Amino acid sequence: MTFHAISPQTLKKQVESALGSLVKSSRLALGEVTVVVEAANYLAACKILRDAQSCGFDQLMDLCGVDYSEYKNEPLSGSRFCVVLHLLSVHLNQRLRLKVFAPDDDAPQVDSVCEVWSSANWFEREAFDLFGIVFEGHDDLRRILTDYGFIGHPFRKDFPVQGHVEMRYDAEQKRVVYQPVTIEPREITPRIIRENNYSGFPSGFEI
């Protein structure tokens, strides 16, 4: 049996009530509820959100990393790396965004939630691969998108666009080899149309 979705305001109150003091902050914007918890309370909060009758978030739809170091071109305030989860309750027909910030910018780490939602497995591997966030308790935390010999984490804001190394197949050695990047960074200047009275629309086109 599927229930009609409750209002976002009611969902926010129910989640806050279920989590109690584990809530660091909560926000309702654009009809969506976002809850932030401390890293130390992250795993416990996830279990409550899954098991509490008023929450019932039985599915993890997405988990990703975020690097806030250059967010909106503003100076960093607070922790740099964040893990964002999108949760779904099928039988209660409601959704929630959960966020947790890794307390250490130099070695970001939070608990794994694979024991809560098995779908977290590959999502956490992706966040580890792309952002370097370590998920404590994950049984098989290794790269999933980049090569095993890849250096760095390509979704970090300070990762160079051209990368650190490049890979190619060497026909003589008959194997893949790594070598320093040969791509030189360049600036691409957009083409600017300077003709007077140029509208960019075909003749006879009306706006």
Image (spheres, rainbow, N blue to C red):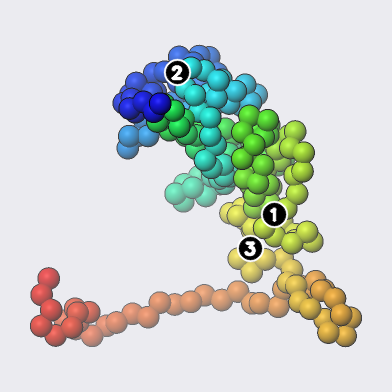
Q: Amino acid at mark 2?
A: Ser
For residue 160, the mark is 3
Distance CA(mark 3)–CA(mark 2)? 45 Å
User: In screen coordinates, is 200 left or right of 133?
Assistant: left
For residue 204, the mark is none
Secondary structure under tag 2 reads loop
Q: How many C-alpha atoms fall within 10 Å of the one at disc 3: few (<14), some, or many (≥20)?
A: few
| Front residue (pair 168, 74) | 168
Distance CA(mark 1)–CA(mark 2)? 35 Å
Q: Which residue is mark 2?
A: 54
Quadrant of image for the N terminus: top left
Above or below residue 99? Residue 189 is: below
Above or below residue 163? Residue 142 is: above
Question: Residue 16: in sight, yes or no?
Answer: no
Distance CA(mark 1)–CA(mark 3)? 20 Å
User: In screen coordinates, is 1 left or right of 115?
Assistant: left
First reached walking from the N terminus: tag 1 or tag 2: 2
User: In screen coordinates, is 82 left or right of 28?
Assistant: right
Quadrant of image for the C terminus: bottom left
Q: Which residue is mark 1?
A: 144
Q: Amino acid at mark 3?
A: Pro
Position in image of residue 191 (x %, y %): 37, 80
- For discs 3 and 2, the disc positioned in front in the rendered view: 2
First reached walking from the N terminus: tag 1 or tag 3: 1
Secondary structure under tag 1 reads loop
Q: How many C-alpha atoms fall within 10 Å of the one at disc 2: few (<14), some, or many (≥20)?
A: some
Quadrant in the rendering for residue 194: bottom left
Q: Which residue is at a point 33% across and 27% down the rendered structure image?
A: 4
Q: Which residue is at a point 44% across and 77% down the rendered structure image?
A: 189
